[in-house]
Image (tube, helix red, strand yellow):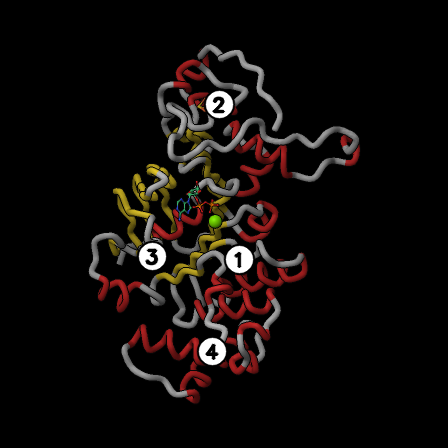
Amino acid sequence: MDKNALVVKNLKGYYRGTFGVVHAVDGVSLKVDEGERVGIAGESGCGKSSFAQLITGTTTPLLHYEGGQVKVYGYDIWKISPEKMRKEVKCKLMSYVPQAMLNSLNPTKRVREFIADMMRERTGRKYSIDEVREMAIEHFERLGLDGYVLDVYPHELSGGMAQRVITAISTLGSPKLLITDEPTSALDVTSQKRMIKLMIDIQREGIIKSLICISHDLAALNQLCDRIVIMYAGVFVEDGRVDEVINNPFHPYTRMLMDSLLPLEPETKDKELSSISGVVPDLRNPPPGCRFHPRCDQCMEICTRKEPPEVEKDGRIVKCWLYTKIGEKGKRVKRHLERR
Ligand SMILES: Nc1ncnc2c1ncn2[C@@H]1O[C@H](COP(=O)(O)OP(=O)(O)O)[C@@H](O)[C@H]1O
Ligand code: SF4
Ligand SMILES: [Mg+2]
């Protein structure tokens, strides 16, 4: 079996409908080694959830896989049969908790019935309540969840508890790779902390080996992940160790994102909190060249017409012309960017 948990190469996925073609994921590559906890961050609408759907082969009706490769432990997700996917990949190698999964839980079913349905779908046979209880209780307790939650309805759980229950259910089969989309975003600060601890515990306990956590919450990713990938307008622009990227961002977009989000130092608290100039591009018609160029204060002439390559710098990957030979002497485009 391939030792890489995930290998993504030049992956593309577009929404197609009467609204046109939305280039939500437009040529991204990523490698996740076994044991890593990787965060995917970026502003709302940059393509994070679409990316999660594409790497798990669970696209919603309008999102179409348009090309590229996704391999989970060597299984080519867009090439293998649905049966192979169900029997060999889902839940064993990879489990996916979509954004707002809580809202999609059937309100008329207790947690144990939900697990029974999931097990039947996975194995093709029926599970009794006792079997479900026996199978789940140890796992739930190992994760600090009392066994009583198996007998309650989703609406009886608080938001934080429900999110932890969903995570526990999703890791029942000890999937090697867990992919979770915005697991902390709807939670209060205390529940967020518990959720982060749970995800760390799941890996420490050896229930999962690797984690991909998608979130617009950089503070949560900073606590949870060892590596972070920054996404902008359908592409990955920076990929590196989380502390290095947050403390010393290379890509102009990452820098602006950090400036706008990180708390102000006491001595600067009277200064205006900077916000990112310009607006997120319409992905039906993304800007040519570097997608960030209309908002970039370091934009060069080449950036307006040619897509930047992915460059390796100090152990990081940066998609920006500044870090190429051209960037060293490239002419800056003069512009007056308006604050949003
Ligand atoms: N069902 C849909 N139909 C059309 N466009 C969509 C749909 N869902 C998302 N999009 C568009 O795809 C882009 C990426 O969305 P998404 O992956 O949800 O971003 P994120 O998770 O980063 O907020 C956005 O421009 C969004 O408007
Ligand atoms: S490629 Fe050019 S426009 Fe894009 S982020 Fe780098 S400097 Fe800015
Ligand atoms: Mg999303």
Question: What's the residue type where badge 3 is placed?
Answer: Thr
- The residue nearer to you, when weighing 284 against 160, is 284
> What label sits on residue 109 in the rendered view?
4
Question: What's the residue type where badge 4 is placed?
Answer: Lys
Mark 3: secondary structure: loop
Task: Give the percent coordinates (x, y) of residue 88.
Answer: 27, 66
Question: What's the residue type where badge 1 is placed?
Answer: Pro
Horizontal arrangement in the rendering, residue 121 relative to residue 313 (left or right): left
Mark 1: secondary structure: loop
Residue mark closest to the camera, 2 vs 1: 2
Question: Which residue is labeled 3 in the image?
Answer: 58
- How much space separates mark 1 and mark 3, taking CA atoms? 18 Å
What is the quadrant of the C terminus in the image? top right
Residue mark closest to the camera, 1 vs 3: 3
Whether residues under marks 4 and 2 lie with C-beta atoms below 8 angstroms apart, the answer is no
Q: Residue at x 49, y 70 (%)?
A: 168
Quick check: can you spot residue 316?
A: no
The relative height of residue 123 versus residue 31 in the rendered view (above or below) is: below
- How much space separates mark 3 and mark 4, taking CA atoms? 23 Å
Question: Which residue is labeled 2 in the image?
Answer: 294
Mark 4: secondary structure: loop
Horizontal arrangement in the rendering, residue 130 relative to residue 18 (left or right): right
Q: Residue at x 53, y 73 (%)?
A: 154
> What label sits on residue 183 in the rendered view?
1
Give residue 126's quadrant in the image.
bottom left
Q: Residue at x 57, y 20 (%)?
A: 337
- How much space separates mark 4 and mark 2, taking CA atoms? 49 Å
Residue mark closest to the camera, 4 vs 2: 4
